[in-house]
């Protein structure tokens, strides 16, 4: 049963994208307010602290604390884990509704819908700090620090599911509800898990991660050679702009993404995900292209077709 004591997706996203938080930029009062709120959500969702007896993991630069990762865990039976993660920092003066209040609220809603946990694997929920420049892709990026100082056994991590830019409509007529899934190319088990959610409220399209590069916190897990899935709707015209505001989000789509992740977690739970590439992932991508474009284009190089699609989807 869903935990009714936790705020709704709409309430959470509205709070985290409130202009009063001034972008949740690190070191600000708004950043601290967001951190406290997210910690309250971990408590309300009945997670246990991830970092020994603490909800927070300081991110360090020498002896200076420059950020705070947040995390909780619900124990399973297998000793293995599934991690759900998204970053919570942003820029001063930008509400950051799509980037990344939407993803945070989706993950909170996912765990609210799951309710009490009786899974085989541990369920880990992380809110990473310092994803945005100037820390992006550096050792000071919150998720990089997390992987380098992991509070869980990374050898037992079966999948890190990372979200970013998940609240907006995709700019293609008839495909505004699309959700892109990157990273499954590294594992047959991940391809099967995504495909097994065949009654998803949102249509999903799998592509290779290297089509666009590491756009978010999955970067840290890829470098560590750990299984990951990156969920995103790509970039849009309000990316890193002051116009990235709550009222522009598609809340229905966001709710559908949360319901998809609930089913994905259920598919991943109990699996031992192997990093194998025995499948022909070109066939997986061609299927995604066929569904997006509505046609099959035999003889046309797949890279050319996907390159044009990526431009149109702002990926």
Image: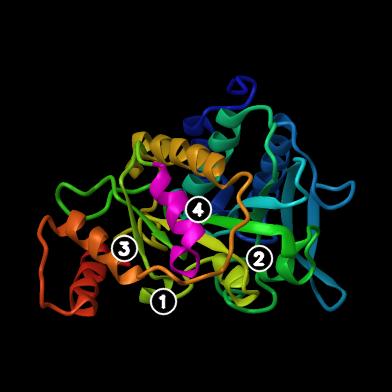
Q: As drawn, is 295 to the left or to the right of 210? A: left
Query: Secondary structure under badge 2?
Result: helix
Query: Secondary structure under badge 3?
Result: helix
Instruction: Give the Cα distance between marks 3 and 4.
Output: 28 Å
Query: Secondary structure under badge 1?
Result: helix
Q: Which residue is mark 1?
A: 210
Q: Residue 143: give its label.
A: 2
Q: Position of residue 97 (x, y in %)?
A: 45, 48
The mark nearer the N terminus, 4 or 2, is 4
Instruction: Give the Cα distance between marks 4 and 2.
Output: 15 Å
The mark nearer the N terminus, 2 or 3, is 2
Instruction: Give the Cα distance between marks 1 and 3.
Output: 15 Å
The mark nearer the N terminus, 1 or 3, is 1
163 versus 309 height, above or below = above
Residue lying at the far front of the rendered structure: 278
Q: Which residues are magenta?
A: 184-197
Q: Does residue 315 belong to the magenta stretch?
A: no
The mark nearer the N terminus, 1 or 4, is 4
Q: Position of residue 206 (x, y in %)?
A: 35, 60
């Amino acid at each position: 049963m869903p935990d009714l004591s936790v705020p709704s997706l709409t309430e959470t996203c509205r709070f985290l994208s409130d202009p009063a938080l001034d972008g949740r930029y690190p070191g600000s009062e708004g950043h601290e307010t967001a951190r406290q709120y997210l910690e309250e959500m971990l408590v309300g969702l009945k997670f246990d602290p991830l970092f020994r007896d603490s909800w927070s993991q300081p991110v360090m630069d020498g002896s200076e604390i420059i950020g705070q990762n947040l995390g909780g865990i619900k124990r399973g039976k297998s000793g293995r884990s599934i991690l759900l993660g998204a970053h919570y920092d942003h820029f001063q003066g930008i509400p950051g509704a799509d980037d990344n209040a939407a993803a945070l609220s989706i993950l909170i809603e996912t765990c609210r819908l799951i309710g009490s946990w009786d899974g085989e694997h541990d369920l880990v929920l992380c809110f990473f700090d310092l994803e945005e420049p100037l820390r992006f892709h550096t050792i000071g990026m919150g998720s990089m620090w997390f992987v380098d100082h992991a509070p869980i056994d990374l050898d037992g991590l079966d999948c890190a599911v990372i979200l970013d830019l998940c609240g907006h409509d995709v700019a293609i007529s008839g495909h505004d509800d699309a959700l892109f899934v990157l990273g499954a190319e590294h594992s047959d088990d991940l391809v099967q898990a995504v495909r097994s959610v065949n009654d998803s409220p949102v249509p999903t399209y799998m592509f290779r991660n290297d089509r666009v590069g590491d756009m978010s916190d999955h970067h840290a897990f890829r470098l560590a050679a750990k299984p990951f899935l990156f969920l995103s709707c790509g970039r849009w015209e309000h990316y890193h702009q002051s116009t990235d505001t709550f009222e522009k989000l598609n809340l229905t789509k966001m709710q559908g993404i949360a319901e998809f992740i609930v089913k994905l977690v259920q598919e991943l739970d109990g699996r031992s995900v192997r990093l194998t590439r025995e499948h022909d992932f070109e066939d997986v991508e061609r299927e995604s292209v066929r569904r997006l474009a509505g046609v099959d284009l035999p003889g046309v190089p797949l890279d050319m077709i996907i390159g044009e699609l990526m431009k149109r989807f702002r990926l």
